Image (cartoon, rainbow, N blue to C red):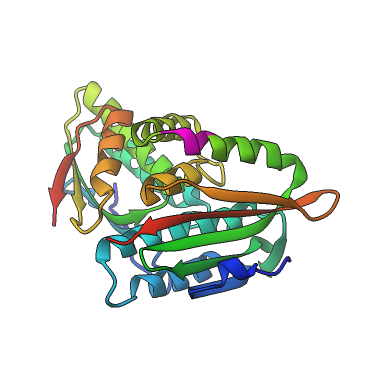
Amino acid sequence: MESLVINEVKGSPYFPFVHFNAETGVCEIRGESYMEETYKFYEPLIQWINDYVRQNKPLVMHFMLTYFNTNSSRLILDILDVFKKYRENGGHVDVYWHYDTKDPDMVEEIEDFMTESGLKINMVSF
Amino acid sequence: MPVIKEEYQQNCLLTYQGPITVNLVSFLGNYIKSFINYDTKVLVKLFKIYIELTQNVSYYSAETKEVKNGVNCGVGWFTLQEYDDSYRITTGNRILKTDAPKLIQYCNEINVLKEDELRELKRKTRAQAMVRDVGAHIGLIQTSLTSGNKLDFSIEPINRSQSFFIISTQVIKQ
């Protein structure tokens, strides 16, 4: 299985940087997310995660999104649902959400994700 | 497109009228974030509200324009105004007349809810949204949550089939 890397594109800051490492299981999604046709961006990510967890290897996810629109939040929830099911089936997954303390609403957003997905998310401020 | 009313042009920091593409949203959004001498937390809120409201126009305006190779985007306008104690972000776009009643009902429903009720509605609506929908249908809920204020809106008929929808909210200075 190969790693998934989507680099930032200058002039298109509405696409986040993605690095899902197939060797270590450490995954990172960073930047801002408010592209058009959001599912076209996120479905390959969800597919990669589904493929990875079939190997029953541990996974660590770092969300470092400073902004995501409501469309993106729907797809992020789908990623969290995959993690939740993986954990329920005995898989090991840790989720970290790194947030900027200058964002007055991000903690509530993360709390809402936890409530909706039933998955614990470790909050890390910077 | 109807002209932007005078009340939305006073004390204006930024205004735009025309097709709203994601590149335009991004460019002007980054300009908003670059305002110096503004409270960072307020700028974060303004940016988030700006994105949600302008993308609503881009996705749902009943007036569209082809911007490249058969790709259409919504046409409308937005303004960002500054007052002594607050900022106001407003967008305007055409809607189908038949969509007006449910839009009025939706905005009124949002406006009577308290913060915790809004968060619950957001979670419930997001869970029900289909992944391939253009929007997650929670943009206006999120706008109200982020601003901490009510949605001011109006719908005025234009012709037999279309009306003009104006929506606005304010962010209080800290």
Q: How many numbered discs sit on the rendered protein? A: 0
Residue B115 x/y as whole percent: 36, 37
Rendered-image quadrant of the N terminus of chain B = bottom right
* The residue positioned farthest toward the top in the image shown: A89
Extreme residue toward the right, this view = B160
Looking at the image, which residue is at 44% across and 49% down?
B143
Decide: is A82 above or below B150: above
Q: Let me know if residue B160 is in the magenta part.
A: no
Q: Quadrant of residue B78?
A: bottom right
Magenta stretch in the rendered image: B109-113
State the image coordinates of residue A110 (x, y, percent, origin top left).
26, 41
Residue B162 higher or lower than B67, as above or below: above
Work out whether residue B33 or residue A12 is closer to the camera in this orientation and state it.
B33
Q: Position of residue A26 (x, y in %)?
A: 18, 48
Q: Is residue B162 visible?
A: yes
Q: In which quadrant is the C terminus of chain B drawn? A: bottom left
Which residue sits at x=46%, y=72%?
B28
**What kind of secondary structure does the magenta stretch mostly adopt?**
helix
